[in-house]
Amino acid sequence: MADKKSTEMGLEDLFLDTVKDIYYAERQILKTLPKMAKAAQSPELKAGFEKHLQETEGQIERLEQVFEMLGKPARGKTCDAILGIIEEGKSIMDEFKGSIALDAGLVSSAQAVEHYEMARYGTLKAWAEQLGMSEAAALFDATLQEEIATDQALSQIGVTAVNQKAA
Amino acid sequence: MADKKSTEMGLEDLFLDTVKDIYYAERQILKTLPKMAKAAQSPELKAGFEKHLQETEGQIERLEQVFEMLGKPARGKTCDAILGIIEEGKSIMDEFKGSIALDAGLVSSAQAVEHYEMARYGTLKAWAEQLGMSEAAALFDATLQEEIATDQALSQIGVTAVNQKAA
């Protein structure tokens, strides 16, 4: 969108920008989840990451449907936010490798990722409604509900399996 | 904590690491909020950012109380996640400068910040409980409730004032 002046930009442009942002983010998450599943010590957490990997594939497909609705190619845009969140997760994996607190750190990192996604999909759903794109809004809502459920499941794993061990 | 092997690290270390992380993040947010308030077009959004600036000062004081409880100096640790989230917000401010969608972009960026904080304070509250630090848990919970309320207020501003204009 470098061909438009900033004063000419509208909500449609911001919407497309943000779809590209989360599309990039989801593909980064898809690459990172297998590493987190591999690192996880508790079978419950490992299974949680594997389940979310499959969900992420479906979430990417939903985004591709939205690109199609917009008549635009499915193309990501570098998302500094997710890169920073993932970078921080990697530091924790290094710093706590072999530690009894590793799983607690993995849960924490994963919840930061989930919250980023919840923020973006919540925003996109609201904008899709404003733009009269009710089908897109429904797709974003489906993903948003999955992210909320994943976040809650992680909290549960964090409290029951991980933290007690680490404490 | 470079003096400990990763296998010797426990939940206390992860807890302190994360307190340092969010302390750094809050101070970055404190520097960024005045810029967002200045950029905001709607008086409602401007006021929202100014209110959250004051809250952020109180949240930093709470973190300093936690450092005191831990007997550690209040010191941040570079938080790549918040740097990435803020960087993305700056790009939106540039790209949509003078545009009718600018406020929608500011709301979206601010909600990404809020969600990062919600993730971190939720985690810290759970860990404080696990570690038997009930006073710290109460401080984290107080901040968490403020972040949730700010996020909801932003959603409201986004829907009523901002998006309709931008659409």
Image (cartoon, coloured by chain):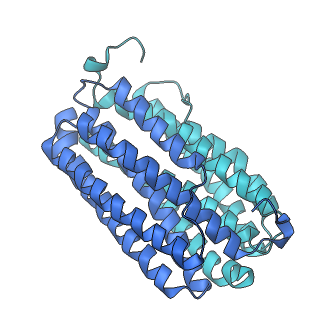
Chain colours: A blue, B cyan
Along the viewing direction, whichever of B68 and A66 lies nearer the viewer = A66
Apparent side of residue A150 relative to residue B73 in the rendered image (left or right):
left
Residue B141 in the image, given as x and y percentages of width and height = 41, 54
Along the viewing direction, whichever of B138 and A166 lies nearer the viewer = A166
Give the residue at x 36% y 63%: A147
Apparent side of residue B108 relative to residue A118 in the rendered image (left or right):
right
Q: How many marks?
A: 0
Q: Quadrant of residue A58?
A: bottom left
Residue B20 in the image, given as x and y percentages of width and height = 50, 33
Residue B140 seen in render: no
Apparent side of residue A4 relative to residue B160 in the rendered image (left or right):
right
Residue extending farthest to the left is: A43
Quadrant including the N terminus of chain A? bottom right
Q: Quadrant of residue B98?
A: bottom right
Apparent side of residue B111 relative to residue B42 in the rendered image (left or right):
left
Residue B92 in the image, given as x and y percentages of width and height = 71, 58
Residue extending farthest to the top is: B3
- Vertical comparison of B21 with B41: above or below: above
Quadrant including the C terminus of chain A? top left
Residue A69 seen in render: yes
Residue B14 in the image, given as x and y percentages of width and height = 36, 31
Give the residue at x 37% y 25%: A94
Give the residue at x 72% y 45%: B31
